[in-house]
Image (cartoon, rainbow, N blue to C red):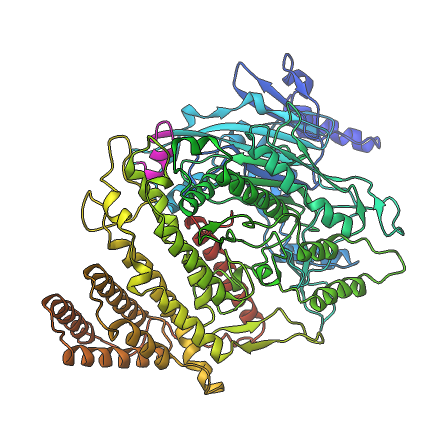
Amino acid sequence: MPYRPLLLLSLLLSFLGLTPLPLLAQALPTIEAKTKGLTRQEGYFPIYWDQDSGKVWLEIPHLKEDFLYVVSLPAGLGSNDIGLDRGQLGGQRVVRFEQAGPKVLLIQANLRYRATTTNPAEAQAIRDAFAESVLWGFTAQAQTGERILVDATEFLVRDAHGIIPRLKQAKQGTYKLEASRSAPFPEMLKAFPQNTELEARLTFTSDEPGNYVREAAADATSFSVRVRHSLVKLPPPGFTPRVFDPRAGYFDLSYVDFGVPIGVPKERHFITRHRLIKKNPTAAISDVVKPIVYYLDPGTPEPVRTALLEGARWWADAFLAAGFKDAFRVEMLPAGADPQDVRYNTIQWVSRATRGWSYGSSVTDPRTGEIIKGHVTLGSLRVRQDYLIAEGLLAPYTSPARSAQQDPMLALSLARTRQLSAHEVGHTLGLAHNFAASLNNRASVMDYPSPYVTLGPEGRPSLKDAYAQGIGAWDKIAIRYGYTQFPPEVDEKAGLDSILAEAQRQGLRYITDADSRPQGAANPYGHLWDNGADVVASLQREMAVRQAALARFGPAVIRQGEPLAVLEEVLVPLYLGHRYQVENTAKLLGGLDYSYALRGVNQQATRPVAATTQRKALEELLATVTPAALRLPRSARTLIPPRPPGYPRHRELFDGYTGLTFDAYAPAQTAAGMVFSAIAQPQRAARLVYQTDLDRTLPGLPQVLDRVTARVWQAPIPADAYDASLQRVSQQAWMNALFDLASYRQNAPAVRALVYAHLHSLDDWLAHHPGKDRTTQAHRTLAHEDLDRFLARDYTTAKGDFEPTTPPGAPIGETLASHAEDWLQRRYRREVLLEHLAAQDEVCGY
């Protein structure tokens, strides 16, 4: 129909007082006519699949109505190093559809900046001040009344999950989306009353794929994954956001609220949590309106399946302690149910080409912090790593019949699997890590516990108490803070404060990632993979267990019929079993005890670690780099042959200098290097310098450096040739650590000066102590010359690459500085996450 008659008809209808349909709707066919012959799936957003054209048609029943848009990865790549796992959730966004002529725009609201106000103009002013984002532009193809039909095919067949940039970031090649080999996935086009699920199979191609892709994909030059687009109805009213307290152990939802009064902080913080409501709000313990139910992936094999169910169900005790009866359940996912469907809280058992971490993610309402879907991903190979660790500790295969007996390695692995299940589900309940829980007798499953191994009566490692069973005291406190429903007459803030005060009275501590993970972390209680309140005693115990297990190391650590070369697989985690306790013990040097204290709350803000504790920690660290601690048993040095056909070398083995043969000295270099790098860590060195200004009884950097050099370089030379070689390995590792510390471009000026002074002192000692035997003379001569070359290198400026900057001053000083701080914090979180993703045995995943 020509445009002019339409316009005249519209004007006539308006004159008669009738509301005309939009001109576009009159020019378009009806939805019924456009989709004739296609099957309509009724749901939140109705959908149509056109088999002949390969198109997905999306019906938009309502414009300008907010909903949740979630992208996820139902079928992944299978590489832990890259991180594109099956079941991986992307971010969630609050979006809406708006129409502009023939265009239908998908617009993301900017919820980072808001205005809580009754003044609509003020709220609109804030919305206009900060940019929204148009995520996609559709073209209306049909319309019936207010309902609009769009072609969603191109919207689905695109890299919405950021796969190409993730591959580039992982240095796996330059990939592109191959449109000719990508299409909607009709089996997973589903519409339900509260959500619509749309999926596409995407193929990515590259002429130069990286090794991680080669490990995982059927064809690394052309691999396919599936990407899900979920359109989800936002939760109804009735959820009350709960205020975030840094002492409570929750993830936070934060935004800037320009509607608060002047003088009130504009940054608002709330916790993330599920909606849970009592049937009887006044009862101390009540049934719930709707329980929280988690569903386990039916693809999980036994006996892991039972262990995961048991561990996840521990949380029922915590909810009961918070006053909720039968509020938390874990069941098997019903037949035909989709684990990516937002209606299901899901626990998935995910396999990868290499072992890696597990994680708990959530789909959360960005407006309020309400968790809509918990989604747990558990890496299947980690249980095998636990089994391997237990084999090294127990050396169980003393006879062919031993393999058929009761399996203590499996018992250990399943005990840890229960912990893993509870841990990751805890994240999806809103809880952050608590790395101080080991201080309080395993008070939380949100810690990273290593197996608690002791020596039995015969001096053999015992695993009888390797992992705790059940939920911990801190976990109950945390759930009470997040979920307790207070009676109407109780002030919520007072009730929450009383819960945290109870935790303080019980002596429960909470320290999370940012204060525990960095190599230069200073908190003496925020430790990963530890047990017990005394860090130094734990290192002593682990070294004793390690020594006892190494003494028994031999063919009995592997099954009959396995190549002797795989002895090295068992040796690696055994020999480096103390690695985490070394990191934890090093935190005592220059350590600072602190909590997330608030003003007005009776908590210790900061307190340096006692001088005696710091010195004791240093001595125990140095005990781990003596020849006696570094030596391998004769069985390891003589029984491990080169790798046979079918068993190629891989990254889970030690590097070495001897080619195909096993290098019996390189493991010592690795072990000594990790100890010395922890001692000579730049931020730790700066704290050692500064702490003596406040308290002269505390050890300073010069005392620490002198003590290490005295124990490493000036100790008597062992008579045993192997031990003497290990001593030289340790000496070289300490020199390398000093060179690294001296070369760090962001060192504090005092650290730079003191380290160089120490290097000059060591250089002078080497010049006057050349050694007596030929090997010692050669070693010390090279060390002396290396030091001379290092100290004599060209140095163009006294400044490092980093100097503290002056905070912004204009226009007044607050706004720009606070935004810069926010940016730095976001960048730090991102860097920590990337480091977390890259570290095979240090990531969340436990």
Q: Is residue 794 left or right of residue 457?
A: left
Q: Residue at x 16, y 78 (%)?
A: 769
Compare residues 654 and 90 and report the one nearer the observer.
654
Compare residues 775 and 591 and report the one nearer the observer.
775
**Going by the picture, which residue comes out furthest to the front?**
458
Give the percent coordinates (x, y) of residue 72: 55, 37
Give the percent coordinates (x, y) of residue 362: 62, 44
Q: Residue at x 51, y 41 (%)?
A: 413
Q: Is residue 210 magenta?
A: yes
**Image height check: is 410 above or below 823?**
above
Q: Is residue 105 visible?
A: no
Q: Is residue 695 left or right of residue 423?
A: left
Q: Is residue 756 magenta?
A: no
**Going by the picture, which residue comes out furthest to the top?**
37
Q: Which residues are magenta?
A: 209-222
**Image height check: is 373 above or below 196?**
below
Give the percent coordinates (x, y) of residue 497: 76, 65
- Residue 140, picture quadrant: top right
Compare residues 378 and 630 and report the one nearer the observer.
630
Give the percent coordinates (x, y) of residue 150: 61, 28
Q: Residue at x 41, y 69 (%)?
A: 620
Q: Residue at x 63, y 65 (%)?
A: 509
Q: Is residue 456 visible?
A: yes
**Image height check: is 78 above or below 629?**
above
Which quarter of the figure is the N terminus placed in? top right
